[in-house]
Image (tube, rainbow, N blue to C red):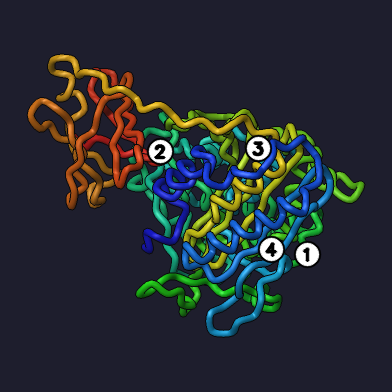
Amino acid sequence: MNSTSRFTAAHALALAVVLAAGAGALAAGTRAAEPGQLPRPADLRALEDVARRELADTNTPGAAIAIVSGDSVVYSNGFGIASVDAAEPVTPDMLFRLGSTTKMFTAAAVVSLAEEGKLRLDEPIGARVPGLDPSIAKLTPHQLLTHSAGLRDEAVMEGLHDDGALAAGVRAMTGDMFFAEPGRLFSYANPGFWIAGRLAESVDGRPYADVMTARLFTPLGMIRTTVRPTMAMTWPLAQGHDVNAGKPRVMRPAADNAANWPAGSIFSSAADLSRFARAFLNGGRIDGKQALSRSLIETLSTPHIDVPGASNPKYGYGLTIVTRRGVRFAEHGGSRAGYGSFISMAPTERVGIVVVANRTGSSLPKTVMKAAEMMLPLLPESTPSPRAPVALEPGEAERYAGKYAQAGGDAGLSIIVRNGALALNTGTQETPISKVGPNRFEVVRAGVPEDVVFVLGNDGRAEFVYRGTRALARLR
């Protein structure tokens, strides 16, 4: 497993910190936007300056950006190069691999089958998918699409490339995939979407890649978008990069594992993704046609489960629902080997922002915030007040102390008592944590505060701990 090649809790937390902060240094000279207005030339120049600077600062060779307002693409552009080995300029039509923004599309395919009466979102999937381990068969689509199935997280970048790999991978899953009781709590997990993709292909009767093309890409007019690498390589394609010795390099060989496609492997472009955003923001309609049902869009973007964290986001189906500076967003980021992406949509204002980039984990959060400031009536940025520490009650520290992990072999982390206070120990570093509210603590790393949230069991002791979007279970 390549732990840097997926949209992890750490990626989610880092992105949320930058977006929540509002990228204050970028706000100068940008007026509060009115919904639906076209960007001014001066704002576009400022946006492009931010994008170029962020590419340089993050060692990202190239990216493409699109902005949707109402039913129109009001801006699209490519920046940088598709490969450091052949300096071809990036264009808005060029394909990038998305990472976890794929999840909103997998969720849409499953919901479309439910709307046709071919499955129910609240029924065990074993009724629709043959050959599953009993522990997997009892899961529901709702649990899979909300990361509440109790599955441990992993991402396997290398594997088979044929259509049968997904079914084989899901059939091989057993009870050791679980670290929590299904339905108990939210915890971000890629395997839930592998299973959801297998459910879609089993019910639809076609391989997952063909399900996505028939149900989503073709109706939306996303003519270059595909899950298959052998199809993607026939179009202009940005090469994936990582960073070595401070310089980006093309990743060779390109990572691929068909058993993991439904969680993070769509190839798409800023131009094609802007078509999805247009449909999403217009009740499923695009080019005068009903490509997706209005009810499907509403189901995806309904807050279904709480996501612990300072900004109190919710999770829909394949989408994070969060209010930032007075505007409600439905969004998701993606990170996989060689690529990063981010799709953010403000349904009320009918504004969407799309970024795709060709370096592992790069999603240009400062550029996304600049575009949001340019297009949306965001409230003035405010600097969060430091949270005052709350004194621990006598004996309370022992309630949280313990070893936490998702599986016995995971590195996990430990919460230890040190001189009557609590500290977080990752095995390589020990950092004090301060109580800031009921079952909520804060750890400061490199000057950036992070939430550490506990979930108590029936005995009053901590049963789980959150860091970012991922829960770890207390090992007893």
Q: Secondary structure at mark 3?
A: helix
Q: Secondary structure at mark 1?
A: loop
Image: 312 above or below 411: above
Q: Which residue is mark 3?
A: 300
Marked residue nearer the N-terminal end (4 or 2) = 2
C-beta proximity under 8 Å, tags 4 and 2: no
Q: Decide: few, some or many residues near mark 4? Use Cα within 10 Å; few <14, some 14-19, many ≥20.
A: many
Marked residue nearer the N-terminal end (3 or 2) = 2
Q: Which residue is mark 2?
A: 150
Q: Is residue 248 left or right of residue 296?
A: left
Image: 428 above or below 56: above
Q: Secondary structure at mark 2?
A: loop
Q: Amino acid at mark 1?
A: Ile
Residue 174, given in percent of the width and then of the height, sits at 38, 49
- At a point 73% along the width and 53% down the height, the residue shown is 42
Q: Is residue 273 left or right of residue 320?
A: right
Q: Quadrant of residue 462?
A: top left
Q: CA distance from mark 4 to mark 1?
A: 10 Å
C-beta proximity under 8 Å, tags 3 and 2: no
Q: Amino acid at mark 3?
A: Leu
Residue 154, given in percent of the width and then of the height, sits at 39, 54
Q: Nearer the viewer, mark 2 or mark 1?
A: 1
Q: Decide: few, some or many residues near mark 1? Use Cα within 10 Å; few <14, some 14-19, many ≥20.
A: few
Q: Which residue is mark 4?
A: 269
Q: Nearer the viewer, mark 4 or mark 1?
A: 4
Q: Amino acid at mark 4?
A: Ser
Marked residue nearer the N-terminal end (4 or 1) = 1
Q: CA distance from mark 4 to mark 3?
A: 22 Å
Residue 412, given in percent of the width and then of the height, sits at 25, 46
Marked residue nearer the N-terminal end (2 or 1) = 2
